[in-house]
Image (tube, helix red, strand yellow):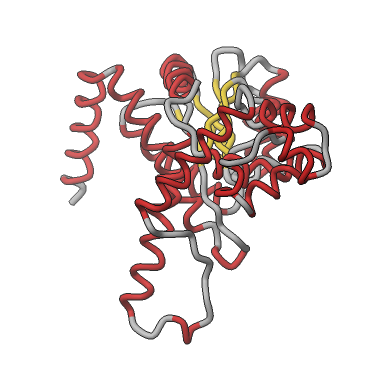
Amino acid sequence: MYSFFNGLVKIKESASHLKPSEQKVANYIINHPQEILDLSISKLAKVCKVSEATIIRMCRSLGFKGFKELKLNISASLSMNETLNTKYEDISELKYFTEVKHIVDFVTINNLKSIENTLSIIDYGAVEQAINILDSARKIDVYGVGASGVIAIDVEQKFARINRWCQAYPDNHGQLTSAAHLTDKDTVLAISYSGETQEVIDSIKIAKQNGAKIISLTKYGKSRITQMADVCLFASSLEKSIRSGAMASRIAQLNIIDIIYTGVASKNYEEAVKYLESTRKSIKNRK
C-alpha cells in the first residue's frame, strides 16, 4: 500500500480518532517511542493496562498489519528524525526571533518537515487513482473554505492553464449550487485539513448523491470527509496550534496538488504543452 511509513507521524495525526483504550496505547507510544522498540506486545499491554487484542486493533486502525510492522516503522521514524535533526516548531513570541535569520529558518524548517512527513505517508496507489479520475472528469469542482479555499483557487488556476473545466468554490453557497448540477461524469476535489469542515461535508453529500466522484485532501486519519470519499489523499503537518495560521499544512497540501496536476498534465503531454504555451503567450502579450 505505502512504499514507506512514518509510524510516529501516523500515530500522532490519527490518535484522536482511535477508541479510548487504543488512544491510551497510542499516547504511550508517542511519549516513549524509543522504549517501544524493546517491548513485546504483552509487556506493552501490561504497561498500558489494556489487552493485547486492543494493541492489535490499534495497529490495524492505523493501517499496520500488526505490532511488529508498527515497531519497524517507529524505528525508521526515529532514524529519519535523527538524520534530519529538526522538529516542527510553533510560532513563538517576538523576543524569540532575535534576528531575521531565525524567522527564515523557523518557517523554512517547518515547511520542509511538512513535505517530508507527507512523503512518508503517501499512498502512491491513491495518487494514481486520483490522477486518472481527474483526467477523465468532464468537470472538476474544488471545494474548500478559509485557508483551504485559497488552495482550491490554486487548483483552478493550474487546471485552467491546461484547458480543463475546473471551478473553485471557496464559499458554501457556490459549492451547494454547483454540487446540485454535477453528474456521474464529474469529480469533486474536497479540501479540508481537519477533514471535518461542515460546509464541505454538506456539499459533497449532494455531489455524491448525483453520482460525482469524490477525492479528498485532508490530514492523515479517518474523518467524515474521508469516509465519504472515493479516493483519499493525505497531507501531513504537525502544527501545534491555531497561531500557525495553517502555514505548513498549506504547503503540504499544495505539494499534493502539484503532484496530481503534474500527473494529469503528463498523461496528456503534447496537449498540455500546447495549452501551456498558448496561455503563456496570451499573458505575455496582454499589453
Is residue 38 in view from this perspective? yes
Frontmost residue, 201 versus 82: 82
Frontmost residue, 172 versus 33: 33
Q: Residue 141 location in percent, x, y?
A: 54, 30
Q: In the image, is residue 47 above or below residue 181?
A: below
The count of marks equals 0
Residue at image point 55% right, 47% down: 148
Residue 206 placement, left or right of 246: right
Splitting the image into 4 quarters, where does residue 195 fall? top right
Residue at image point 24% right, 27% down: 275
Residue at image point 54% right, 38% down: 7
Q: Residue 112 location in percent, x, y?
A: 38, 53
Splitting the image into 4 quarters, where does residue 164 fall? top left
Residue 154 placement, left or right of 243: left
Frontmost residue, 237 versus 12: 12
Q: In the image, is residue 41 above or below residue 133?
A: below
Q: Residue 146 location in percent, x, y?
A: 59, 53
Q: Residue 279 location in percent, x, y?
A: 24, 36
Is residue 219 in view from this perspective? no
Frontmost residue, 134 versus 67: 67
Residue at image point 67% right, 30% down: 59
